[in-house]
Amino acid sequence: MKKAILTIAIAVMGFTAAFAQDSTKRPRRQMPKLTAEQRAEKATSRLEKELNLTADQKKKIYAVELENAKKMETWRKAEEGARKGKMDERKAAIDKQKAKIDGILTAEQKTKMEAFRAEAKEKGDRMHKGLRHGDRKGKGPEAPNQPTKG
């Protein structure tokens, strides 16, 4: 009888340890819900700070950013299946927006903008790489809480 109780107790402890939750993961930070106007203002102020825009350039870029933010807002509200089919349309709209903004900027500002875009792309690539589970070269994800022997 004692052996049966001991076996059950060991099994319960083993299952408890096997199914324990990993508490080291941080919860994802929720992004605030911004309107199209708020998104356009945020993007314009960031570009104004980075590129030292004139008042006229700021007004024109705000108009371009507002147009783009409204398009993106309608795309976000679309159904999931419809979203996937419109990826090419989105990419074309983004390229068109970049061309409009480049048409407004001076040569020096364009150079800064290209550097800014390259930096953002690199940051996005690093973030995307960090979100993948494990390494694609055959290594699996590392277990953060491995038991120590001793």
Image: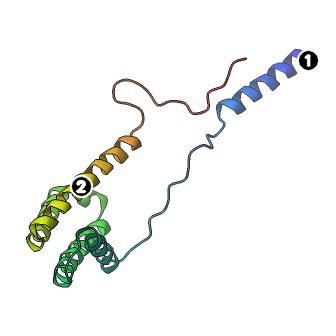
Q: Residue at x 34, y 29 (%)?
A: 136
Q: Amino acid at mark 1?
A: Lys
Quadrant occupied by the C terminus: top right
Picture coordinates of residue 12 (x, y %)? 76, 29
Q: Which residue is mark 1?
A: 2
Q: Residue at x 14, y 70 (%)?
A: 101
The one of 59 and 75 positioned closer to us in this rendering: 59
Q: Residue at x 56, y 45 (%)?
A: 25
Horizontal side, residue 65 vs residue 99: left or right: right
Quarter where residue 60 is shown? bottom left
Position of residue 41 relative to residue 25, above or below, is below
Secondary structure category for the residue under label 2 = helix
Position of residue 103 relative to residue 95, above or below, is below
Picture coordinates of residue 46 (x, y %)? 30, 70
Picture coordinates of residue 132 (x, y %)? 39, 39
Query: Cα distance, mark 2 to mark 1?
Result: 61 Å
Q: Which residue is mark 2?
A: 84
Picture coordinates of residue 78 (x, y %)? 28, 66
